[in-house]
Amino acid sequence: MHCYAAKERSTGEKRAALTPTTGESLVKLGLEITAECGLGALSDFADEAYEKAGVKLTGDHAGSLAEADLVLGVRKPTPEAISGMKSGAVLMSHLDPFNEPDLVKSLAAAGISAISLEMIPRTTLAQKMDVLSSQMNLAGYSAVIQAAARIRKSLPMMMTPAGTISPSRVFVIGVGVAGLQAIATAKRLGARVEAFDTRPVVEEQVRSLGARFVKIDLGETGQTEQGYAKELTPEQLQMQRDGMAKVCASADIVITTAKLFGRKAPIVVTREMVAGMQLGSVIVDLAAEGGGNVEGTKLNEEVVTDNGVIIIGEGCLEGHVSYHATQVFASNLSGFIEHFWDAEAKVMKIDLEDEIMQGCLITHGGKVVHERFQNLN
């Protein structure tokens, strides 16, 4: 089975889908691995390291794409990439199928078996394949680091001959994987941290990290089977905003992480709430790619409001630590391939009876096969 990993064509994308370590592991399985020259250049993986691992380097992107049985990527493929792949090939990458119906239909029409990485079920068995968790973990860390670099205050308390410097206050909204890492990072840097989530069940996790859990009575809430917060009613959203306004007003850094899987991110910080914040405070909106949690967020831009609040809307904060983001992303893909590897036939099986495959296989055999997108056929 011939596998090809190409450089990402998306502007600003620094991650790669293969490292020398995962390349070596896949070669040992029996895969023939080809990587585009410079694949890992933006994440500090040298071409020489890939070659040493048994990965063949190529400058012929079109030719390698056309020959590949398995194509590995980070971002969704371009129309040119889809037309350049052979029918029957397997593609593994982010696809954003809820918001890209035309892309899904074109993959089906091209006869490509498309695996959407963000659709991999969040189960115990699939943990080693969970790209969302691995990337959001790093995004939560990076959010704190980027905010700390923008704010004109130190994060920890300091005792100086000139007096005591109070610790900066960090408010994290949404306590999933990214939120928990943001809390942990801010605490390690010495900040005073508060956090809120619609799921009361996470209070113990917040407290275990040394942060204060902000309690707002929203009535009945909960989480989905995959661990995501359930969508709030308009009334609950307003109650949440009212309860958070005072915390935002006293915060030096606000980090929002509220995402709704497959749907637009909810607005949890309004313009009025931003207007009530301190001059020089920083908001990092981790939901920017999904529409944003903050009114005024602009994707991949930094906005300074009239009252001097900085809103950071980067779509890929994990890209700031692209070495480790690539390392864990590639490991997730390698774990998926190993799980479905047929050692005797030396191919990655498309097992339609497997629950993990059922959860993330979008197109196969010229059709849209995932039940949630069947109406696209």
Image (cartoon, grey):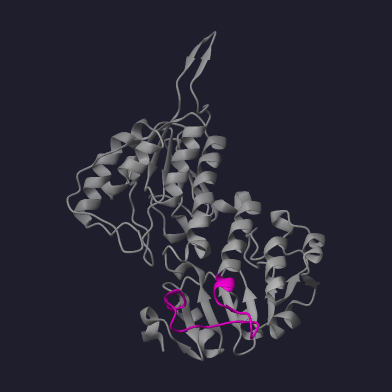
Residue 323 is situated, as x and y percent measured from the top left of the image, at 66, 53
Residue 196 in view in this figure? yes
Residue at the front extreme of this rendering: 344
Residue 276 in view in this figure? no
Total numbered labels? 0
Task: Give the quadrant of the C terminus.
Answer: bottom left
Residue 77 is situated, as x and y percent measured from the top left of the image, at 59, 74
From the viewer's perspective, tell me whether residue 4 is left or right of residue 267: right
Magenta segment: 336-359
In the image, is residue 209 above or below residue 226?
above
Q: Nearer the viewer, residue 60 or 274?
A: 60
Residue 122 is situated, as x and y percent measured from the top left of the image, at 42, 64
Residue at the left extreme of this rendering: 219
Task: Give the quadrant of the N terminus.
Answer: bottom right
In the image, is residue 262 above or below residue 186?
below
Q: Is residue 345 magenta?
A: yes
From the viewer's perspective, tell me whether residue 362 is left or right of residue 47: left
Q: Nearer the viewer, residue 257 or 292?
A: 257
Q: Is residue 126 magenta?
A: no
Residue 78 is situated, as x and y percent measured from the top left of the image, at 60, 76
Q: Residue at x 45, y 34 (%)?
A: 281
From the viewer's perspective, tell me whether residue 11 is left or right of residue 244: right
Q: Residue at x 38, y 47 (%)?
A: 175
Please tell me in which quadrant of the rendered image residue 18 appears. Answer: bottom right
